[in-house]
Image (tube, rainbow, N blue to C red):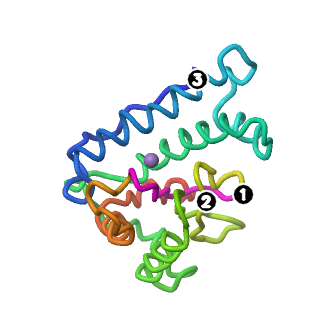
Amino acid sequence: MFKISPLPYNYQDLAPYISAQTMELHYSKHHQAYVDNLNKLVLGTDMETMSLEELLLKINNQPEKTAIFNNAGQHYNHEIFWLSLSPVASKKEMPSALKIMIERDFESVDNLLARFKEEAAAQFGSGWVWLVLKNDKLMVTKTANGRPAFLDGAKPLLALDVWEHSYYLDYQNKRLDFVEAVFKNLFNWDFAAKQAGL
Ligand code: MN3
């Protein structure tokens, strides 16, 4: 059985940048539905007892397993997404070791935000934008639908959900306003630094 992890904060803790209503729907309905669907699809198979990463690696590029892959990928991505955010009240400075790496690979934190917006704008339809570490270099990448970035050899440091259910109630069609608000106010840079091994 796959299980959704408890949220590390309350629904209202990301407001006003993400409303409590969006959080409740996103976590308790959207994310939960992926987990419920995944559990139904793997019931009674050897996939039931695999870890999520193991399962995704095994069924990657198997067209007959697309439904399982989509739900497993979305479960995996949301688990990282919730950890990529932190409550407004506990906002902290970016760890200096991470800032040095960002300046090495993007020249500035402003350029990193610009890269997030570029990738978010370029993702036609639903998907994810990521800050990843690949071959010891920070990169911003995007994946379509429920595909996790780790399947392309990248260590995820931050995940940003750019499916419409992630922002539509709060930002309507303005995806890039959502991206900028999350980047400036909610990203958990401590989590990113930890993922990077800093
Ligand atoms: Mn989502």
Crowd around label 3: few <14 · some 14–19 · many ≥20 (10 Å): some
Residue found farthest to the bottom:
107
Residue highlighted by disc 1? 152
Could you tell which of marks 1 and 2 lies nearer the N-terminus?
A: 2
Q: Is residue 108 above or below residue 163?
A: below
Amino acid carrying mark 1 in the image: Asp
Respond yes or no on whether mark 1 lies under 8 Å from ligand 1.
no
Q: Amino acid at mark 2?
A: Thr
Q: Which mark is residue 39?
A: 3
Span highlighted in magenta in the image: 153-165
Q: Are marks 1 and 3 in contact (CB under 8 Å)?
A: no
Is 4 situated left or right of 72 in this image?
left
Judging by the rendered image, the residue that carries numbered circle 2 is 143
Would you call the spot at circle 2 few (<14 residues within 10 Å), some (14-19), or many (20 or more)? Answer: some
Residue 92's quadrant in the figure?
bottom left
Percent position (x, y) of residue 107?
Answer: 51, 86
Could you tell me how far apart the alpha carbons at marks 1 and 2 are, in whole angstroms? 10 Å
Disc 1 is placed on an element classified as helix
| Residue at horizontal 41 percent and vertical 82 percent from the top | 110
